Image (cartoon, grey):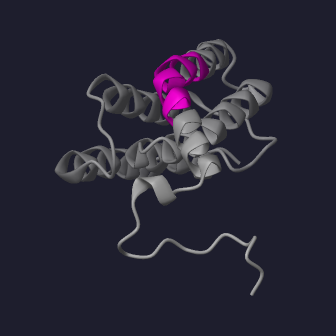
Amino acid sequence: MDGNIAQPASPGSSEEDVPDAVRDTEATVAALADSFFEWIGEDIARAKQALATAKDKPSDNQAEIRAIFEVVHNVKGQGGSFGYDLLTSIGGSLCSYLRVETASASEKQLKVIAAHFAAMDFVLEKNIQGKGGEISDQLTGKVAQLVANIPAPD
């Protein structure tokens, strides 16, 4: 075997055995995590602004719904990358709800979107990392109930 190929660490290996590239990557992710709340807050604020605009024209808000979808799709990915699995779950629910790219949303459907944002805000305000435990079941249950009762835009 080529002596230049990195080998998996053995069970007894120390931190000194971890390649510099791995340590550098971990440091970069940690630095990005510090900025996560700023980014995610800006992203969600942008989506909420699109929601506010969409409320002013419920029969002709395709562009705003598409903008919300694009932001929430990013939030979904970022949440999982930084340990906010519940945020990813809520974002995934909203992405699924807004799956039709050319749809406008009614007033009721806009309320479902707003409920998703309220759940995301709660997760961030309470800094709920991971899957969220019992609170996760409550939040996702309420959102799922709305989604089940108010059909998605189509």
Question: Is 145 left or right of 16, judged from the image as shown?
Answer: left
Residue 8 against residue 73 in the figure, above or below? below
Residue 39 is inside the magenta segment: yes
Question: Is 57 left or right of 133, judged from the image as shown?
Answer: right
Residue under the image location 78 percent in, 81 percent down? 2
Residue 126 against residue 23 in the figure, above or below? above
Task: Please provide the residue range marked out in magenta.
Answer: 30-43
* Picture coordinates of residue 53, whole percent (x, y): 66, 13
Q: Residue furthest bottom?
A: 1
Residue under the image location 74 percent in, 49 percent down? 100
* Picture coordinates of residue 114, whole percent (x, y): 47, 27
Question: Is 114 left or right of 46, judged from the image as shown?
Answer: left
Residue 142 in which image quadrant = top left
* Picture coordinates of residue 86, whole percent (x, y): 38, 46
Residue 129 against residue 62 in the figure, above or below? below
Question: Is 115 left or right of 153, judged from the image as shown?
Answer: left
Q: Main secondary structure of the magenta part?
A: helix
Residue under the image location 44 percent in, 76 percent down? 10
Residue 146 is inside the magenta segment: no
Q: Quadrant of the N terminus?
A: bottom right
Of 109 and 87, which appears nearest the observer?
87
Of 18 and 133, which appears nearest the observer?
18
